[in-house]
Image (cartoon, helix red, strand yellow):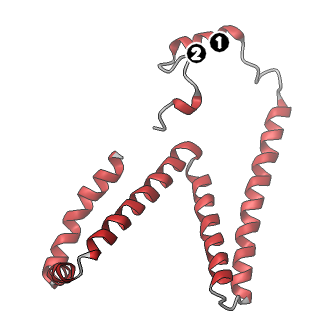
Amino acid sequence: MEMLFCSTVVGLPFLIPPMLFTGQLFKAWTSWSRHLYVYGVLVIEAMAAFIGQLSVLSLIAIFGAANTAMITTARKAVTLLLSYLIFTKPLTEQHATGLLLIAMGITMKIFLDDRSNKKALNSSPIANIPKPSEDKELMAQSDYAGEHEESRPLV
């Protein structure tokens, strides 16, 4: 939340002067006064953008940047495919090749991660088992002792 707020506060001074200099701010203001429904549309779009940005930042906090990039790329590929199916656009060879490459890249990433996790588990099974005394010490030192993983804050 703080990052979204700070980026907006820092970005606003960079946007306002050019809008004043070109006169676009005044044109927009007069258009808004003639079409009052625009205020509702702007509020809905702002809320949707906020939820989207918060979702991406939460994904980064939980799964990391690389996995979030794969998730957003897969979402874009599915959106592209659905737009071709719903709006009956011609699907060219280049589009199909792009979708296939995206699917192959995500599949390879999942396969390689799964394979490396299996190697890590098989390499030293005894070293991965925590001692009971270490578990108790870690839980005692933790600020969130006794809480479930799901109830912890993301950041």
CA gap, disc 2 to disc 1? 6 Å
Residue 60's mark? none
Residue at 72% over, 17% down: 130
User: 10 Å neighbourhood of mark 1: few (<14), some, or many (≥20)?
Assistant: few
Q: Are marks 2 and 1 in contact (CB under 8 Å)?
A: yes
Q: Is residue 96 above or below residue 50?
A: below
User: 10 Å neighbourhood of mark 2: few (<14), some, or many (≥20)?
Assistant: few
Residue 138's mark? 2
Asked which secondary structure carries label 2, the reply is helix
Q: Which residue is mark 1?
A: 134
| Labels in figure, total | 2
Asked which secondary structure carries label 1, the reply is helix
As drawn, which residue projects farthest toward the right?
122
Q: Position of residue 45 (x, y in %)?
A: 37, 67
Residue at 24% over, 56% down: 9
- For the residue marked with disc 1, what is the amino acid? Glu
Residue at 40% over, 62% down: 49
> Can you tell which quarter of the image residue 32 is in?
bottom left
Q: Position of residue 133 (x, y in %)?
A: 67, 7
Q: Quadrant of the C terminus?
A: top left
Q: Position of residue 115 (x, y in %)?
A: 82, 46
- For the residue marked with disc 2, what is the amino acid? Leu
Q: Is residue 96 above or below residue 68?
A: below
Residue at 70% over, 10% down: 132
